[in-house]
Amino acid sequence: MLEELKQEVYEANMSLPKLGLVTFTWGNVSGIDREKGLFVIKPSGVDYDELKPSDLVVVNLKGEVVEGDMNPSSDTPTHTYLYNHFPKIGGIVHTHSPWAVSFAAAKLDVPAMNTTHADTFYGDVPAADALTKEEIEEDYEGNTGKTIVKTFEERGIDYEAIPAALVSQHGPFAWGPTPAKAVYNSKVLEVVAEEDYHAMQMTMDNSRLPQYLLDKHYYRKHGANAYYGQNNAKSQSHAKHE
Amino acid sequence: MLEELKQEVYEANMSLPKLGLVTFTWGNVSGIDREKGLFVIKPSGVDYDELKPSDLVVVNLKGEVVEGDMNPSSDTPTHTYLYNHFPKIGGIVHTHSPWAVSFAAAKLDVPAMNTTHADTFYGDVPAADALTKEEIEEDYEGNTGKTIVKTFEERGIDYEAIPAALVSQHGPFAWGPTPAKAVYNSKVLEVVAEEDYHAMQMTMDNSRLPQYLLDKHYYRKHGANAYYGQNNAKSQSHAKHE
Amino acid sequence: MLEELKQEVYEANMSLPKLGLVTFTWGNVSGIDREKGLFVIKPSGVDYDELKPSDLVVVNLKGEVVEGDMNPSSDTPTHTYLYNHFPKIGGIVHTHSPWAVSFAAAKLDVPAMNTTHADTFYGDVPAADALTKEEIEEDYEGNTGKTIVKTFEERGIDYEAIPAALVSQHGPFAWGPTPAKAVYNSKVLEVVAEEDYHAMQMTMDNSRLPQYLLDKHYYRKHGANAYYGQNNAKSQSHAKHE
Amino acid sequence: MLEELKQEVYEANMSLPKLGLVTFTWGNVSGIDREKGLFVIKPSGVDYDELKPSDLVVVNLKGEVVEGDMNPSSDTPTHTYLYNHFPKIGGIVHTHSPWAVSFAAAKLDVPAMNTTHADTFYGDVPAADALTKEEIEEDYEGNTGKTIVKTFEERGIDYEAIPAALVSQHGPFAWGPTPAKAVYNSKVLEVVAEEDYHAMQMTMDNSRLPQYLLDKHYYRKHGANAYYGQNNAKSQSHAKHE
């Protein structure tokens, strides 16, 4: 079942090592079929050079395995929570990419300091609170999704406009309309985290982008008036890699 | 039309990922035929591994597309402005190479701190002012060229002697007598930005090169008395990669 | 003799350059046959691209060469000491991987600041004391093992739960139930050292993981209640790369 | 003439890009035949992927070209000066490797902070003074050699025991008994400069190695009592890559 989606999710998973986003097996991508209410996710702990599309596991929105011989990623409850609470996303990526992890360890947002950031993220990428002892013991992976969603709600962030978050002391999650787009967003986050780190070490100024520059770059690539690329008037969800 | 120039601009574009200067499609090179007053530029948002010479777009010095099926780079008005105001340049490169972007985000010039810098840039590479709200809303990409030219004029910098600039909060632009030479300058900027960052973290001293060392290294490679390479007395515009 | 173990140790040695953990010949892996009381180790100073399984040297637990035409690694007495004092380990790796060396040079533990760390190391990876003049002159390599074991004893660290150490001013050692697992632990140490460095530069807070988060991630992958990967209930010693 | 030496110098030059020590053409290696008093050096500004052994230029100890159609490296007078004043060296490397350049820009010695350093360099690698205006104008490249030699004399450093130097605001030079060994030393310098930088950012302590640890590691690999590698009792000049 879901053969086409499996292929798409497989390719998105395989792009993680090519983009330098994972060490060993430390990353996973899922993709969802919204009509069927089922998502496809990488099995837990499988080496990328051994992964096959048929290894992927099909899970429903209660987090139950519907098809597959292998254990799904141990992060499956996080994906489930995010799909349930961010109803417009089509793919999710979790990695431990090193620059994003450094910000997560320092419990710092990745600030919007350059236009590459603004092309993809319409503001700072938030560092969600680390989980409490109770949250960890109750349902660690589910509550990992919950702290992300709570952060977006409390800070009034649009999850489509800022399609990524850090979980403090843990690492980055990114999402998007498709698995491939989620991987793209994950890479952008890693790139801008590296650039921000170096800029932050060189200046004490508040060097966040002004709102009008954020607006310009974000809407140059997104929404009805976009004019970047070859499909200008298309929405983010239809654009290919920007 | 301009088949030879297209090939040259195509090869210059393709060298960007090889030199580690671009992620995804985030970069573009153009080259100009000064006699015809036409330049050739990368189409917007096309993956490097799909790019073909025939995809390149021909544009005139009013910024109008003269030939090509695809949209030109969204940065075309910046290229147009620079070609109009820097009349001796033959090629322009724009990237988001990470070290140069870090300096741009911190709104800092890339200081002349070592002889590699002086071999190519006869002084600090300036960080041009970020655009104002009005400049962004009026003509973002055109005014991106304008802030660069204004910075060179106000600070009395010779654009042939310092063939690159940062636009604050955005990223680097480089140029040169040919597209290949512009790419070369773009790479030098990235290399010296990395070296400067680390040197700046290690010392509080003003470690800029003295004028006489700038002179020595710059004129060892440029102008009538150059003696580096195999074509010593040739001008910069005829030298191959130095 | 020990042909299978030699192959295993050979492959583990060859994975070091692939994982970016060694420059030139600066690293070695050994593996032990506990029943026979013999271990197999890389010869000293041999290039990785010339190394063959038959070059490996067999050594007993007194540190005496039992088989092999070449000199064993000059670090053989360190391996011997560790095998004698850490009776449950099956493989040892010594490298000079650059991030771990930077912490060793600064005489700093690699702190547990993110969940990647906790997945493998149940707490800070300790920086053992540098050797004294007397210890160096008496038996340098043997006492290198001794300072590690002494640090684990004095600080009450379980060598199975934190399977790596730095020797101050020198570099990292890692171990595990198998040579491959020791290499894995060596890579994790390098990755988290890099992430910690950047996090430490960005924040003055004590950002060590709380005990309950350490517990969660460590026991998600280790022990009877592990649920990561495809072999959940298996102990660390039987799991493949996690 | 000197065909064997040419091949050796050619291979040493070609190893520079493989070891990540050069960008573009920014590096050169030479090797000397002490009996004939002639050295072989890379031509100026030739791309590594176009370089052939027959392109190499033969120069005498007055710095005069004896054989070769191409211009020798513009740094030839520096090599000449060093060969004349360091009579036991057989090969010289000059690069602009980025970590060494950062220390040179900051005018800082590369301190002996870890045992990798001590394995090759018996103490800090000195940053020689930048040249004065007069020295630059008089004979830039020759005086570049002179500032190195002067630094070694004034600080009483043995050029065989510390086979490298930085020239402040410029970059690193390394040497050794053979061209290959000089390249090796050049790479070690780059590696330890990176490690030192990070260690220096993490600690304010004086973390230089104590003399007895320097002694141990240096003499483990050099001199009559060396016991690293497969040729223990051989002197440095006969050892292969350590």
Image (cartoon, coloured by chain):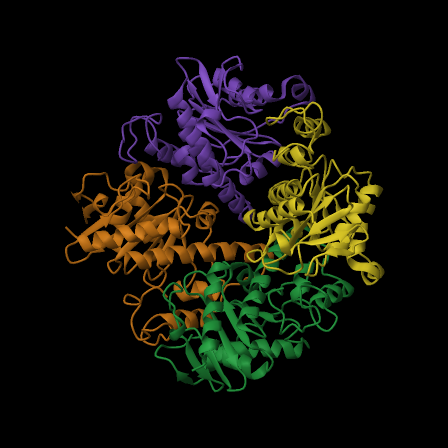
Chain colours: A green, B yellow, C orange, D purple
Residue at figure coordinates x 28%, y 34% from the top left? D227
Q: How many labels does the image show?
A: 0
Rendered view: C21 above or below A174: above
Visible in this render: residue B120? yes
- Residue extending farthest front: B1
Left or right relative to A157: residue C34? left
Left or right relative to A15: residue C73? left
| Quadrant in the picture for the C terminus of chain B | top right
- A107 or D70, nearer to the observer: D70
Q: Where residue A66 sits in the image (x, y, percent)? A: 41, 85
- A207 or A20, nearer to the observer: A20
Rendered view: C56 above or below C239: above
Rendered view: A134 above or below C29: below
Residue at figure coordinates x 75%, y 70% from the top left? A225
Q: Where residue B42 sits in the image (x, y, percent)? A: 66, 54
Q: Where residue B90 sits in the image (x, y, percent)? A: 72, 42
Q: In which quarter of the image is residue D98?
A: top right
Q: Where residue B135 sits in the image (x, y, percent)? A: 83, 58
Left or right relative to A68: residue C107? right
Residue at figure coordinates x 25%, y 61% from the top left? C88
Visible in this render: residue D122? no
- B60 or C198, nearer to the observer: B60
Q: In which quarter of the image is residue D162?
A: top left
